[in-house]
Image: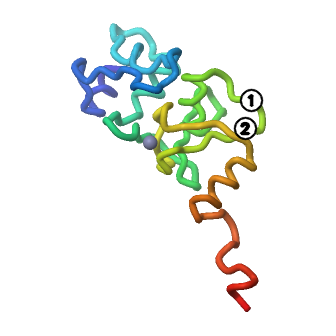
Amino acid sequence: MRGATERNERGPTAQIVPEAGAPSNARVGVFLFTSGGAPASIEERFWSRVRFSDGCWLWEGSRFPGGYGRFSPRHRDEVGAHRFSYSLAHGTIPPKMCIMHFCENRHCVKPSHLWMGTYSDRTRAAIAKGRFPGRRKTTRKEAA
Ligand SMILES: [Zn+2]
């Protein structure tokens, strides 16, 4: 755990506290600096791969091909790092729910930058931002 801390250039002074607006049950930061040789918990392993800043908290572990962080809480189990972070802060994510980024940064795992919605929420958000996933480059009108 200590090695991971040094790799992230994070010291005891770089204490992470939930920012304003973060859920009150967000447990971020609390367990980051527990050392003493105990095996790292899943949460410690997770946060040791995050680079904290005032802005986004960037995942520095491996990534899925789509660019989202990839975290393996246990053997042969992989989840999106942003989803894992969200579930730490808010609890289990119901089936079929998407976790999306306010900040549009797929590497970001900061709970307050994440929101949960349905697939149609996601589609609506993508359209609102002008980047509908898939083939929406030219409408029929534009193409005509
Ligand atoms: Zn962010």
Q: Nearer the viewer, residue 33 or 2?
A: 33
98 is higher (above) or lower (below) than 13 = below
45 is higher (above) or lower (below) than 116 = above
- Image check: 54 left or right of 137? left
Q: Residue at x 24, y 32 (%)?
A: 9
- Image check: 20 left or right of 6? right
- Which amino acid does the dot numbered 1 rest on? Pro
Find residue 94 and name its label: 1
Q: Are marks 1 and 2 in contact (CB under 8 Å)?
A: yes
The local crowd at label 1, few if under 14, some if 14 to 19, many if 20 or more residues have their Cα within 10 Å, is: few
Q: Nearer the viewer, residue 131 or 53?
A: 131
Q: Nearer the viewer, residue 6 or 110?
A: 110
Q: Position of residue 12 (x, y in %)?
A: 24, 18
Q: Position of residue 99 (x, y in %)?
A: 63, 39
Residue 32 occupies quadrant: top left
The residue that disc 2 covers is 97
Find residue 52 and name its label: none
Residue 93 occupies quadrant: top right
**Quadrant in which the N terminus is drawn:** top left
The local crowd at label 2, few if under 14, some if 14 to 19, many if 20 or more residues have their Cα within 10 Å, is: some
